[in-house]
Image (cartoon, rainbow, N blue to C red):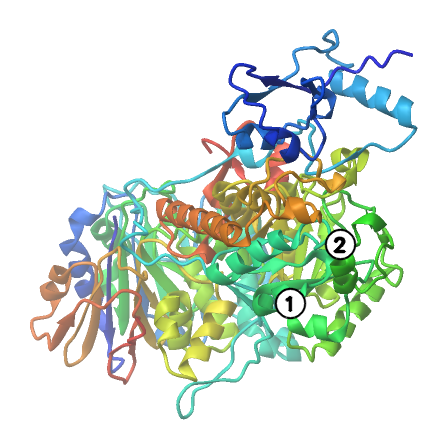
Amino acid sequence: MVRNFPPEFVVRVDREACINCLRCVRECPFGVHEYDREKKLWKRHHEKCVACLRCAYMCPVQAISIERSPMEYAPHPVWTNRVRKDIKTQAETGAVILTAMGNELPYVSYFDRLVLDACQVTNPSIDPLREPMELRTYIGRKPEKVELEEDNGVRLKTKIAPNLKLETPIMFAHMSYGSISIEAHLSMARAAKEVGTYMGTGEGGMHVELYPYADHIITQVASGRFAVHEEYLKRGAAIEIKIGQGAKPGIGGHLPGKKVTEEISRTRMIPEGSDAISPAPHHDIYSIEDLARLIYALKEATRYKKPVFVKIAAVHNVAPIAVGIIRAGADAVVIDGFRAGTGAAPQVHRDHHGIPIEAAIASVDRRLREEGIRHWGSIIASGGIRSSADVAKAIALGADAVYIGTAALIALGCTVCKKCYTGKCAWGIATQDPELRKRLDPEEGARRAANLLRAWSHELKEILGALGLNSIESLRSNRDRLRGVGLTEPELRVLGVKPAGE
Amino acid sequence: MCGLGGILNRYGERMSGREIIRMSCMMRDRYDGRGGGFAGYGIYPRYAEYYALHLFFRDEVAKERTEELLKDRVAIIKDEPVPMRRVREIPPENIVWRYFVEVPHRFRDRKEYQEREEDYITELVFTINDCIDGAFVASSGKNMGVFKATGMPDAVAEMYKVEKYRAYCWITHGRFPTNTPGWWGGAHPFNLLDWSVVHNGEISSYGTNRRYLEAHGYKCRLLTDTEVVAYLFDLMVRRQGLSMRTAAVALTPPFWKQIERMPEPKRSVFTALRMTYSQAMLNGPFAVIVTNRDTMVGLNDRIKLRPLIAASSEDCVYLASEEAAIREVESNIERLWAPRAGNPVIARLNEEVREEVIH
């Protein structure tokens, strides 16, 4: 049977400019460029091209450009090109379609339908370059009230639970060592320490090279329990139990044995070359009381010195689940929206499970307040946060802080070609290949990751200034400073915002 | 833009309303006539032990429905119309009635009501404002009352005969609203139990503060940002037992940079206050005067985006938006100053006035 499967991209090479240096052959991990030395003939395997653009940017004479293939199936509004390609792929392989990064279907983005307020006349805007502007955020359990002893000098009677102190309400999301390289981890760890925020280890453990930054690292306990031991838990600043993730709610993970190199095996504490399988559920958590037990087991193991977070995917019933998590003793609930990225996920899960993070934040915040326990734990939102405006809107909807994953990787050079699961990342991020890893310099990576945080923090300050606020705390859950544009009444009700003009 | 004024006689001696009216008139170009009001403490000495409820009714139906509820919930010791003059500037919009009430004995014997008598009255106030269409509780404290309406403060004073009342503490407000429509209930002072607030500016953190209060059972239904100030003081001082000073500090706390420079244990106290009360913190341009039965507090936002002047004489402490308003009524000023941003000025009966230096 003829394989009638048009390539997504075509590689165009300016033959006059090309100097036959073969750089593109060495740069492309996907084998797009092939040169027959004997016949002196080039062959470009267009169907293998993922548009990572590595060859184009490394070509010394800029002879290469990558274009979308003009060849497509006849247009049809229902049987789109993608649908037809998926069917053909599955007819060929009989398998689940694997992909990476975040949801690709054109669902409405609530962030893009929410607008921020600004000051005019009656409330002066504030210039953050002249006036103090505060982004500091504490993540963790807060007391309901403060009790002071005011007899001889003021003294604190209330005991404050351990909290994470963030100088900006943005953290680097959990991406495991294994799914990404040590260089990527190091870049984010350094940036987090420099800026005064935190990064997550993901479930792949903490490589020894990260130890100097451990006080700015949140360790993760996931269903595979990789790397979990007392020292690991005590070393980090906080612990996160991962129940689910927004990119693939309800399913687990699988790091193929061929990626479990010596260092990864040591860090994850599993045999070299063995598959690292994270089951869909934790096999010791089948209910909320089991989760409570794990939360307190971790707190006991760390002598109640580390806050414990619980991460869930944003699903239909996210509000009561989050309330249960907070009541079970978590110091923060992490909600991962359906746009969240991943290193590998079945396309069907990535694109069809879960709910938008905006709606999840609003309903979790509302529910915790209705139950009078909003101060028991913080809300960390993640999944598809693309800019400082998204951060501001997430906080105005009720989040305390956000995690960024994809955005952080883009800062490190990622071009979102969605091939993380192949382990062939051409930019040295989602790979363990020693040659490819050399492409990411952790110094440079740290500089860029820190710059991104700084730039967004600057913008957040400017946003606050325009809103006439001088502290991020006064934006939290301040939905009055948001308006919806082009949203239906039920959507506005869920988000708790008024339509523009009202 | 709005104008505020307040006088507290430090020795608890009562003064007629004339002075506060003069203070208010002096700041006339800060108002546009869409709201004015006064609150006086010590005005009902004969009924001092009862809650004095000042109510606005749009019509007789609202009044009847409210009285049904009142009879069900509290014992009415006395009720009467609030004495009023007809004034040309203010069309009669409401029936204004006052009730002196107490929590009935059948409830008072129950332990939970003894402990929570004030919560019981708060609940009643919220029920009336929330559930009875056309009824609004203007004030609900003991031995005090709020007189307010849509109009210039001098006309409001004329209408309510404010000059005939005698109080040891008076506050006033004239409104130039830019956020909510002018209605009698929307004029200042805002009151809950003994707490009264007048406010100039905008609470830009209103949404955050409101949700914080709602999580503690308060209902913010007055379509204005000022009410949150009264409720925050009620929550923090009455219900949680913080001192006025600590509550004021938590509402306009020092910046983190200032906290970091503090010595221990002060630093951990301020850190704990900011962490715990982050959503109570008031943000935006404002000057407020908050009063209860023995205290008058003046408070500015953390970067002083609204005017507030304080002064003291031998007997009295003054707060106002304009220095001229104070000079109008007091010729023997001992001290007059502009409090610094975020520093509460606390005047208490039988004590020296203090500006708490926290910033």
- Residue A62 appears in the figure: yes
Point out the frontmost of discs 1 and 2: 1
Q: Looking at the image, which is closer to me, B45 or A334?
A: A334
Q: How many marks?
A: 2
Reply above or below: B205 against B19.
above
Q: Quadrant of the N terminus of chain A?
A: top right
User: Are the two marked residues, 1 and 2, in contact with CB atoms closer than 8 angstroms?
Assistant: no
Q: Foreground: A70 or B104?
A: A70
Q: In x, y percent, where is residue B24?
A: 19, 57
Q: Position of residue B289 (x, y in %)?
A: 31, 64
The chain under label 1 reads A
Residue beneath the point at 41% across and 76% down: B246
Residue sitting at 55 percent across and 20 percent down? A18
The answer to which quarter of the image holds residue B48 is bottom left
Q: CA distance from mark 1 to mark 2?
A: 21 Å
Query: Relative to B115, is A265 above or below?
Result: above
Mark 2: amino acid: Ile
Which of the two labelled residues, at mark 1 and mark 2, occupies the earlier sequence position?
Answer: 1
Whole-percent x, y for residue A228 in the image: 77, 67
The residue carrying mark 1 is A238
Q: Is any atom of residue A399 visible in this view?
A: no
Same chain check for tags 1 and 2 = yes
Residue B350: give x, y in percent of width and height: 28, 85
Q: Which mark is residue A56?
A: none
Q: Please name the residue that numbered disc 2 is placed on.
A: A321
Q: Name the residue: 53% across, 59% down.
A: A190
Residue drawn at x 42%, y 84% as measured from the top left? B264
Farthest top residue in view = A74
Q: Secondary structure at mark 1?
A: strand
* Figure quadrant of residue B109: bottom right
Q: Amino acid at mark 1?
A: Ala
